[in-house]
Amino acid sequence: MTPALELSELVVTLDGPDRTALRALDRISLSVAPGEILGLVGESGAGKSLTGSAVSGLMPAAARIAAGEIRVDGTRIDNLPRSALRRLRGRRIGAIVQDALSALDPLYSVGDQLAETIATHSGARSWAEAQARAVAWLGAVGIPAPEINARALPQQLSGGMRQRVVVALALCAGPCLVIADEPTTALDPSVQAQIIDLMMRQARRENTAFLLITHDMGIVAEAADRVAVMYAGRIVETGAVADVLARPKHPYTRGLIGSIPALSERVARLHQIEGSMPRLGFPSPACPFAPRCPRVFGRCRSERPELMAAERGEVACWLWPADADAPQPQGATADA
Amino acid sequence: MLLFVVSRILQALPVFLCVVLVAFVLFAFVGDPVLIMLGQNYTEAQRAATAHRLGLDQPLIIQYCRYVWATLHGEFGVSYRLSRPVAALLAERLPATAELAITATLLSVAVGVPLGVFTAVHRRRRVAGILLSICLVALSVPTFLLGTLLILVFSVGLHWLPSFGRGAVVHIGWWSTGLLTASGLRSLVLPAATLGLYQKSLITRLTRVEMLDALGTEHIRFARARGLPRRSIYVTHAGRNALVPIVTLAALQFGGVLAFSIVTESVFQWPGLGLLFIQSLGAADIPVLAAYLILTAAIFLTLNLAVDLSSTLIDPRLRSSLRGFPPARDR
C-alpha cells in the first residue's frame, strides 16, 4: 500500500548569518500509512513543527529543503512549483494548528470560513450549498446547534469549539494526510480527549493518515499507532507505541516517558532530563544527546549513531544492538 | 445601529457648539461691525441705534444663542468684502471644491490602495522598492512646487491642459459642475493630480504597512494551509483586516482637501472654498471666516461619523449589538 506520507532523507536548512546554512533537519526518514496516526514527539526546538511545515509547504522564509524527498500519497511534492503545491494544500494535505483563536480570521463567521474552504476545494454548486455543507461539518465535529453557531465569530466561541472548527476546516476537503501540530496543547484535558477522539474516528472511518506533532507522551500513548522521537533535528527512535512505551530503547525516549508523573506514586521531585538541546550550527562528531545522557560512554563522544533496526523498531544509539561493547540496558523500568 | 448613529451625533454636538463659540468670539471681538457699517462720520445716537438694531447691545450669552440659532438656519451674515450673504457665497464655491476633492480622493484611493497591496505582496521585488521610493519623493515635494511644475510642463510647455480656472460649467439647480464639459474635465486634471499625488503616496505607504501586518498573522498562514486562492487571501482576508485604518486615513484626507486645499486652489486659481478663504483672510472678512470655520467643523464631524459607521461594517467586533450573541459552550 502506498504510504500517505513518506519522507526520505529529508534535510532542511535555515539561512544563518553570513550566508551560512544551519542544518535544522538532518536526514529525516519516516512514513505514515493511510489510516495511521504517527506521533512525532520531542522537546521544543527538536524540529517537529519544521518537519510538519515542510510537508504542508508553510516553512518559515529562512528555511529551505536542501536534500531528500517528500511524497504524499505516492506523489513527490518537495520539487513542485508553488502553484501546484497550493492546489494540494487543504485538498490533499490538511492542517490542524495549535492556537485556533489566532488561526481563524476574526472578521468572518466560522460558517463562512468553512463554506469558503469547502467551495474552494469541492466545487459546491452555490454559496448556499457550501453553507449547508459547512453547517453539516460543524455538526459532524460535535458543535451543538450548528445552524446558530455557524453565524458566530471565532472569538464568540469557546476554545474547544474553535479547535473543533479548525479540525472541520482541515478535514472538510477530504485530505489523505493531516498534519496536526500540537492540536490539543492549548486545551483543557477533557476537551483534549474529545479532539483526540475526533481525529482517531476520522482515521479509522475515512482512512486519513495523521502526523500528530506533540511534546506530550500522554497524547501519543492515547492516540498514536506508531511514534517517532526527534532530538536536535534527527529521529532517534521509532516503533509501535506499545513497544516504545513499554520498552524505550533510547535514553532520551526513556527520559521523555519518565517525565510523565505516574498517578499511583507521589514523588518528591518530578523527573527531568538535565541540560538542554545543543544549539544549531555547532556540528560535532558526537551523539547530540551525549552531554545529557545518563548512560553515555566512550564511543558516544567520538562517533554519531545512525538510525538502525533494533528489535521491532529503530533506534539511533550505541547501546544498540545489545551485543555492542557497551553496558547492557537494564530493562524498561529502571533508569534515572 | 440607529442607536449607534444617534449616540455618535450626540457626542459630536458639544464639539460643534465649541466651534460655533469660537466663530462667535471672532465676530464679537475682532473688529466692530457697527463702525464698519457706519463708515467715517456718525453720531453717538446713530451708533447706538445701529447696535440696537443688530442686537449688539444685548448680553453676550443672548447674542451667542441668537448666533447658534442663525447658524442652524444657515444664516452666516453678510460678507464685508463682497456685501453678499455668506451662505450664498459658500454655496457658490462649494461645488468647485467638492468636485476637486472627490476626484483627487477617488484617484488617490484607486491608485494608492492597489499599489500598497502590490508593494506588500511583492515586498522582496525591486519594483516594490522603486515604487516606495517614488512615494517618498512625492510626499516630500511641496504642493505649490508640484502644481507649478505641472503647469510648466503640461500647460506652458506642451499646451495640453489649461493652467488655471475651472473651464466651462453646467448648472444643475444651485450646483455648478465642470464634470460635464470637455474644458471642465481638462481643467480638473492638473489640480486633481496635484492634490491626489500626496494623498496617494500616503495611502500607499499605510496600505503597505497594514497589509504586511495582516499577512504576517497566524490566520493568514492557516488560510494558506487550507489552500485558499491567493486572491481570497490577499483581498478577502488580509485586505479586510487591513482596511479600517486605510478608510480612516482616506476620509480624513478627503476632509483635509475639502477644507484646506488652499495652496492648490491658489496655484490653479480654482474658484473654490480655499481660494475664497485666502481672499477673505486678506480682507479680514470675519463673517466668511467664521462661517468657513463652522463649515469645516461640520465636514469633519460628518466624516468621522461616516468612518465610525464604515468601521463597524468592516469589523464586526466593533458592533456592540453582537455582544448579545449566545456564546456556545462545550458539551
Image (spheres, coloured by chain):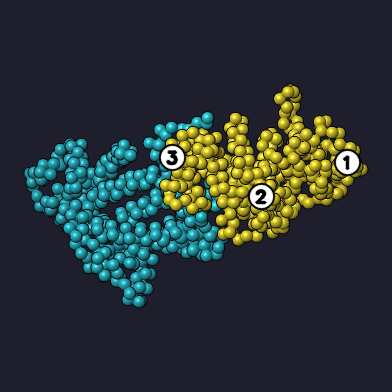
Give chain A's shade: yellow
Alpha carbon distance from label 3 to label 2: 35 Å
Is A211 on the left-hand or right-hand side of A89?
A: right
- Identify the residue at horizontal 20%, vertical 45% (top origin): B71
- Identify the residue at horizontal 25%, vertical 51% (top origin): B292
Q: Which mark is residue A322?
A: 1
Is A283 on the left-hand or right-hand side of B267?
A: right
Alpha carbon distance from label 1 to label 3: 60 Å
Secondary structure state at the residue bearing disc 2: loop
Tell us which disc is closer to us: 2 or 1: 2
- Identify the residue at horizontal 81%, vertical 33% (top origin): A332
Whether callout 1 and callout 3 share a subunit is answered yes
Lower position in the chain sequence, tag 3 or tag 2? 2
Lower position in the chain sequence, tag 2 or tag 1? 2
- Measuring from the top left, give residue B171's x and y in whole percent: 19, 62
Q: Chain of mark 3?
A: A
- Measuring from the top left, give residue B92's x and y in whole percent: 20, 58
Q: Which residue is mark 3?
A: A151
Secondary structure state at the residue bearing disc 3: loop
Q: Amino acid at mark 2?
A: Ala
Give chain B's shade: cyan
Tell us which disc is closer to us: 3 or 2: 2
Q: Amino acid at mark 1?
A: Ala
Secondary structure state at the residue bearing disc 1: loop
Q: Is A182 or A134 nearer to us in this picture?
A: A134
Q: Is A102 or B207 nearer to us in this picture?
A: A102
- Identify the residue at horizontal 65%, vertical 60% (top origin): A79
Q: Which mark is residue A4?
A: 2
Question: Eyeballing the image, is B324 above or below B244?
Answer: above
Whether callout 3 and callout 2 share a subunit is answered yes
